[in-house]
Image (spheres, rainbow, N blue to C red):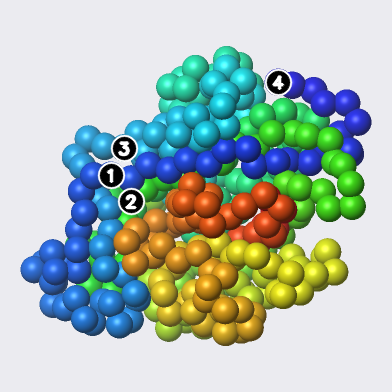
């Protein structure tokens, strides 16, 4: 693994983004044929119109490899240039080994370190924080941070409260260690992470290796999740801004976890942010857990909305509860 001297003078720059989605689209009308619901009911409560669902035999690693490959292409480098992969997922291919090592092999990464982290919907921000700190400490030079999920594998397709929400996909960014320069350093400015285990049962699966020897199916308490989500997302956002003496007026873009449209819109109100500054993709992707932020980020970078020197805030909250934020100067 690369050793960077003078680690305190280094920062992590995002130099590439990529995404991957399954081909299969499942619309609200499709779901209405499976459970007692309607397109209008789903759209009004969640803002979701469709989601992508992985095909039989299509794994989380397949989506992660696709997103990583696209991010490498945008960065103009190869897998041999990478010395760190941090992959966030709660739906790994197998209990072991880590899904990240499948990506390591597929992209031709030679040596270095590849591992998974699990913080569910907050996972990408947690993974970004790990990679950023390893670069700052001199333990890596070029990293791929991935959020990849096949949430359809743990959804109960007879439960209309959960099956309408989730989708599959992956997003990735390439981070490169660079010397800090000037009064407005670019790259990851800071990350802020939290968890509160008192709420571990609010979003959970009813299975696990040591308890039921199965993955189980997802359950969530929607009202409690909504209330905690809007508070925690807002607090994590304000924490990131305050740590740099900034306010919401300084932000160019907010790329939040795409839980559902109501949560994102309520966050905008609490932060006094116009929705024009919020990247919203939940309508066509659903909630893709750890993949949601990098999927939305990749879209906004690729279509030119996010530009050089833009200030981008990425708040997230997930099961556990876990929550956090990342602030990046593009």
Tell me, for residue 264, which label it has, or none. Answer: none
**Where in the figure is residue 92, as x and y percent of width and height?**
40, 41
**Where in the figure is residue 139, as x and y percent of width and height?**
76, 29
Disc 1 or disc 3, which is closer to the eye? 1
Work out whether mark 4 precedes mark 1 in sequence or the reverse, and give the earlier one. 4
Q: Which residue is mark 2?
A: 168
Count residues near mark 1 (Cα–Cα under 10 Å), then give few for <14, some for 14-19, many for 20+: some
**Disc 3/disc 4 C-alpha distance (Å):** 28 Å
**Disc 3/disc 2 C-alpha distance (Å):** 10 Å
- Check disc 1 and report its element: helix, strand or loop: loop
Work out whether mark 2 precedes mark 1 in sequence or the reverse, and give the earlier one. 1
Q: Are marks 2 and 1 in contact (CB under 8 Å)?
A: yes
Horizontal side of 43 relative to 287 (left or right) equals: left
Q: How many discs appear?
A: 4
Work out whether mark 2 precedes mark 4 in sequence or the reverse, and give the earlier one. 4
Count residues near mark 4 (Cα–Cα under 10 Å), then give few for <14, some for 14-19, many for 20+: some
Horizontal side of 235 relative to 107 (left or right) equals: right
Count residues near mark 2 (Cα–Cα under 10 Å), then give few for <14, some for 14-19, many for 20+: many
Disc 4 or disc 1, which is closer to the eye? 1
């Amino acid at each position: 693994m690369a050793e960077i001297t003078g680690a305190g003078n280094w920062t992590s720059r995002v130099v590439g983004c990529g995404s991957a989605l399954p081909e299969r689209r499942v619309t609200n009308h499709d779901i209405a044929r499976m459970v007692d619901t309607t397109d209008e009911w789903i759209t009004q409560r969640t803002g979701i119109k469709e989601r992508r669902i992985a095909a039989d035999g299509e794994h989380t690693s397949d989506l992660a490899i696709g997103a990583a490959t696209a991010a490498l292409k945008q960065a103009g480098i190869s897998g041999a240039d990478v010395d760190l992969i941090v992959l966030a997922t709660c739906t790994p291919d197998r209990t072991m080994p880590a899904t990240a090592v499948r990506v390591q092999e597929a992209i031709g990464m030679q040596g270095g370190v590849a591992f998974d982290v699990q913080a569910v919907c907050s996972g990408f921000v947690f993974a970004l924080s790990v990679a950023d700190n390893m670069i700052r400490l001199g333990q890596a030079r070029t990293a791929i941070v991935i959020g990849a999920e096949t949430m359809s594998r743990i959804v109960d397709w007879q439960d209309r409260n959960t099956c309408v929400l989730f989708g599959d996909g992956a997003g990735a960014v390439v981070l490169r260690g660079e010397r800090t320069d000037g009064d407005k350093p670019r790259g990851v400015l800071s990350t802020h992470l939290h968890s509160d285990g008192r709420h571990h049962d609010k979003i959970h699966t009813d299975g696990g290796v040591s308890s039921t020897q199965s993955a189980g199916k997802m359950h969530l308490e929607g009202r409690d999740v909504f209330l905690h989500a809007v508070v925690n997302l807002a607090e994590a956002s304000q924490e990131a801004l305050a740590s740099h003496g900034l306010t919401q007026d300084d932000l160019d873009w907010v790329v939040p976890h795409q839980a559902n449209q109501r949560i994102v819109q309520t966050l905008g109100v609490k932060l006094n942010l116009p929705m024009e500054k919020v990247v919203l993709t939940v309508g066509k992707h659903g909630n893709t857990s750890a993949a949601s932020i990098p999927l939305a980020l990749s879209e906004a970078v690729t279509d030119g909305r996010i530009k050089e020197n833009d200030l981008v805030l990425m708040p997230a909250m997930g099961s556990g509860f876990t929550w956090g934020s990342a602030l990046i100067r593009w």
